[in-house]
């Protein structure tokens, strides 16, 4: 597994997403800590949203840029419609698919992807590799927030272990 794939799913620069999410009960996933703008559930839903946007772009599906950041976090109805277990599985399946693409032929990683930008901004283009790098960085940012919330809840490290320093 190459380093990009490791960043998406493995034990690279941080604890793997699957380990961070393991054994986390639904009630803690939905708990909002004082001062935090989002719950763990909302952070993961947001990461899954952008991960799917990247995968759609890589597949050649043109996706529209959200009109507002609020649309990249779940509504109350969306939270009721998808359990924590289902959301976790959806994110992890997307991460595995992203890692498989990252481990694919080098020529495929150099293909250009059309990325819609915020209204009024020019359309951006990047390679599949760059799109996956952006996804890995974005997910790592949000998983850092998740780990901090887990630490604040006294629910860290996970059963399979994680960095505690």
Image (spheres, helix red, strand yellow):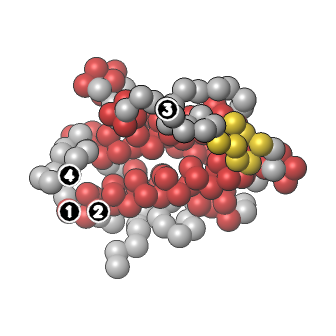
Residue 154 x, y percent position in the rendering: 20, 62
Choose the circle earlier in sequence order: 3 or 1: 3
Q: Which mark is residue 121?
A: none
Q: Which residue is mark 4?
A: 36
Q: Which mark is residue 148?
A: 2
Q: Give the vertical position of 122 relative to 127 (above or below).
A: above
Choose the circle earlier in sequence order: 3 or 2: 3
Choose the circle earlier in sequence order: 3 or 4: 4
Choose the circle earlier in sequence order: 1 or 4: 4
Distance from the alpha carbon under mark 3 to that under mark 1? 37 Å
Residue situated in front as seen by the camera: 156 or 60: 60
Crowd class of label 2 (few under 14; some 14 to 19; many from 20; radius 10 Å): some
Residue 55 x, y percent position in the rendering: 63, 36
Distance from the alpha carbon under mark 1 to that under mark 4? 11 Å
Distance from the alpha carbon under mark 3 to that under mark 2? 33 Å
Q: Residue at x 37, y 32 (%)?
A: 68
Q: Which residue is mark 3?
A: 119
Crowd class of label 1 (few under 14; some 14 to 19; many from 20; radius 10 Å): few
Distance from the alpha carbon under mark 1 to that under mark 2? 6 Å
Mark 3, secondary structure of its residue: loop
Choose the circle earlier in sequence order: 2 or 4: 4
Residue 65 x, y percent position in the rendering: 51, 31
- The reply to whether the C-beta atoms of the residues labelled 1 and 2 are less than 8 Å apart is yes
Q: Which residue is mark 1?
A: 152
């Amino acid at each position: 597994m190459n380093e990009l794939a490791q960043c998406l799913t493995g034990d690279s620069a941080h604890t793997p997403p699957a380990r961070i999410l393991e054994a986390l009960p639904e009630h803690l996933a939905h708990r909002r800590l004082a001062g935090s703008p989002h719950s763990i559930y909302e952070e993961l839903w947001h990461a899954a949203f952008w991960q799917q946007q990247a995968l759609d772009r890589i597949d050649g599906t043109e996706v529209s840029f959200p009109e507002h950041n609020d649309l990249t976090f779940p509504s109350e109805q969306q939270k009721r419609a998808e359990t924590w277990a289902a959301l976790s599985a959806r994110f992890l399946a997307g991460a595995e698919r992203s890692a498989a693409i990252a481990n694919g032929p080098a020529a495929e990683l150099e293909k250009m992807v059309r990325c819609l930008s915020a209204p009024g901004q020019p359309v951006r283009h990047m390679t599949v590799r760059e799109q996956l790098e952006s996804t890995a960085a974005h997910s790592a940012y949000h998983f850092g927030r998740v780990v901090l919330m887990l630490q604040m809840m006294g629910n860290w490290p996970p059963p399979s272990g994680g960095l505690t320093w």
